[in-house]
Image (cartoon, rainbow, N blue to C red):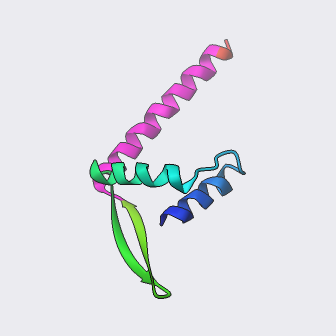
Protein backbone atom coordinates (compact mmCIF):
# COMPACT_ATOMS: atom_id res chain seq x y z
CA UNK A 1 0.00 0.00 0.00
CA UNK A 2 1.11 3.55 -0.51
CA UNK A 3 0.81 6.26 2.15
CA UNK A 4 -2.43 7.96 1.15
CA UNK A 5 -4.03 4.56 0.63
CA UNK A 6 -3.08 3.63 4.22
CA UNK A 7 -4.73 6.75 5.65
CA UNK A 8 -7.93 6.04 3.75
CA UNK A 9 -7.96 2.35 4.68
CA UNK A 10 -7.49 3.13 8.38
CA UNK A 11 -10.37 5.59 8.23
CA UNK A 12 -12.56 3.07 6.41
CA UNK A 13 -11.79 0.13 8.70
CA UNK A 14 -12.39 2.19 11.85
CA UNK A 15 -15.50 3.87 10.45
CA UNK A 16 -13.85 7.27 10.82
CA UNK A 17 -12.62 6.73 14.39
CA UNK A 18 -8.98 6.77 13.30
CA UNK A 19 -8.03 9.62 11.02
CA UNK A 20 -4.36 9.48 10.28
CA UNK A 21 -2.82 12.47 8.56
CA UNK A 22 -0.14 11.97 5.98
CA UNK A 23 2.03 14.38 7.99
CA UNK A 24 1.93 11.97 10.92
CA UNK A 25 2.19 8.83 8.81
CA UNK A 26 5.27 9.51 6.69
CA UNK A 27 7.72 10.11 9.57
CA UNK A 28 6.52 6.82 11.07
CA UNK A 29 6.97 5.01 7.75
CA UNK A 30 10.51 6.39 7.43
CA UNK A 31 11.34 5.19 10.96
CA UNK A 32 9.89 1.73 10.32
CA UNK A 33 11.88 1.49 7.11
CA UNK A 34 15.04 2.55 8.91
CA UNK A 35 14.40 -0.13 11.54
CA UNK A 36 13.96 -2.81 8.88
CA UNK A 37 10.28 -3.38 9.71
CA UNK A 38 9.08 -2.32 6.26
CA UNK A 39 10.63 -1.88 2.85
CA UNK A 40 9.52 0.34 0.02
CA UNK A 41 9.50 0.20 -3.73
CA UNK A 42 8.67 2.88 -6.24
CA UNK A 43 6.28 2.10 -9.06
CA UNK A 44 5.31 4.40 -11.88
CA UNK A 45 1.49 4.70 -12.00
CA UNK A 46 -0.05 6.88 -14.74
CA UNK A 47 3.29 8.59 -15.26
CA UNK A 48 3.78 9.35 -11.56
CA UNK A 49 6.10 7.68 -9.10
CA UNK A 50 4.27 6.09 -6.21
CA UNK A 51 6.04 4.59 -3.20
CA UNK A 52 4.58 1.33 -1.93
CA UNK A 53 5.39 -0.04 1.51
CA UNK A 54 5.61 -3.74 2.42
CA UNK A 55 6.30 -5.60 5.66
CA UNK A 56 9.64 -7.39 5.82
CA UNK A 57 9.97 -10.80 7.46
CA UNK A 58 11.15 -8.97 10.59
CA UNK A 59 8.05 -6.78 10.35
CA UNK A 60 5.76 -9.79 10.00
CA UNK A 61 7.29 -11.38 13.11
CA UNK A 62 6.91 -8.14 15.05
CA UNK A 63 3.29 -7.75 13.90
CA UNK A 64 2.44 -11.29 15.06
CA UNK A 65 4.11 -10.71 18.44
CA UNK A 66 2.31 -7.40 18.97
CA UNK A 67 -1.04 -8.92 17.99
CA UNK A 68 -0.53 -11.71 20.53
CA UNK A 69 0.44 -9.16 23.18
CA UNK A 70 -2.67 -7.08 22.46
CA UNK A 71 -4.94 -10.14 22.60
CA UNK A 72 -3.49 -11.05 26.01
CA UNK A 73 -3.94 -7.48 27.22
CA UNK A 74 -7.57 -7.36 26.08
CA UNK A 75 -8.25 -10.78 27.61
CA UNK A 76 -6.84 -9.60 30.94
CA UNK A 77 -8.88 -6.39 30.85
CA UNK A 78 -12.00 -8.40 30.12
CA UNK A 79 -11.21 -10.74 33.01
CA UNK A 80 -10.68 -7.85 35.43
CA UNK A 81 -13.87 -6.01 34.54
CA UNK A 82 -16.14 -9.05 34.29
CA UNK A 83 -15.35 -10.65 37.64
Residue range highlighted in magenta: 55-80
Q: Assign the C terminus to one quadrant of the image.
A: top right
Q: Position of residue 74 (x, y in %)?
A: 57, 28
**Which of these two is toward me, 64 or 36?**
36
For the point 66% across and 16% down, the residue is 81
The foreground one among 28 and 78 is: 28
Vertical side of 19 occupied by 74: above or below: above
**Above-or-below relation of 13 to 67:** below
**Residue at the image point whose x is 46% and y is 88% from the top:** 47
Left or right of 32, for residue 1: right
**Which secondary structure is most common in the magenta stretch?**
helix
Residue 71 spot, x, y in % from top left: 51, 33
Does the stretch in magenta take in 63? yes
Name the image quarter holding residue 54. Answer: bottom left
Quarter where residue 6 is shown: bottom right
Q: Which residue lies most toward the front here? A: 23
Left or right of 28, for residue 73: right
Above or below: residue 77 compared with residue 60 = above
Residue 1 is situated, as x and y percent measured from the top left of the image, at 48, 66
* Image point (59%, 21%), residue name: 77
Amino acid sequence: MYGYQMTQRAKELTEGELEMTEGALYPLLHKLEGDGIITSEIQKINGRDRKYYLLTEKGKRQQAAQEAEMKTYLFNLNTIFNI
